[in-house]
Image (cartoon, grey):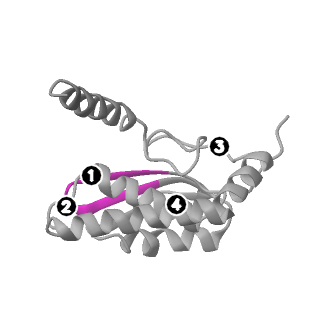
Amino acid sequence: MKKLIPFLIGSFLVFGAAACQNPAGTSESAPDNTEQTTQSPTTGEVQESKEDAQSEVRRDQLNADIRAREQRNNMTGGDTDRADGDLESEVRSKLEANLPASQLAVEATDEGTVTVSGTVTAQDQLDKIEPLAKEIKGVNNVIVKATVAQPTSRN
């Protein structure tokens, strides 16, 4: 039993570190970083992403994740010292839950600055990015590099 607990904790840490290597994107076809240019999404990608984002189960998962992180941060001192990865993940979840069919990458830097790039399908979605991101504790400034791109049909 004494050897099992350290093994399990070590395995959890290794798995967690490997899982954190993925960039914070709102969809699989989102750019890998905020400097990468994006192509217009296909109509199939838009429909698939929209169905997933509008799924009540998915929205509940994202919102529960955001609430849990906020509660954890409140217990540990709030937004005074937030890790960039936490900000990226929370902003990505917030955007994913509220902007269906978006393909956005999120990158956080020191001092609570968050950069969002990629594409959305309508101007009203583009206008929602900054207010949604600022709802997350610790986000002080939002740089929006995203553009509006209508879905295209590719074969």
Q: Nearer the viewer, residue 136 or 5?
A: 5
In the rendered structure, which segment of residues is drawn in magenta?
105-116
Q: Which residue is mark 4?
A: 61
| Vertical relation: 38 (above or below) 149 | above
Q: Earlier in the sequence, mark 2 or mark 4?
A: 4
Q: CA distance from mark 2 to mark 4?
A: 28 Å
Residue 115 lies within the magenta run: yes
Residue 136 locus on image (x, y percent):
35, 70
Instruction: Quickly name the residue at label 2.
Output: 111
User: 35 or 72: which is nearer to us?
Assistant: 72
Q: Is residue 10 magenta?
A: no
- Residue at the spot x=50%, y=61% of the render? 62
Callouts 2 and 4 close, C-beta under 8 Å: no
Q: Which residue is mark 1?
A: 84
Distance (Cα) linking label 4 and label 1 = 21 Å
Q: Earlier in the sequence, mark 4 or mark 1?
A: 4
Q: Quadrant of residue 96?
A: bottom right
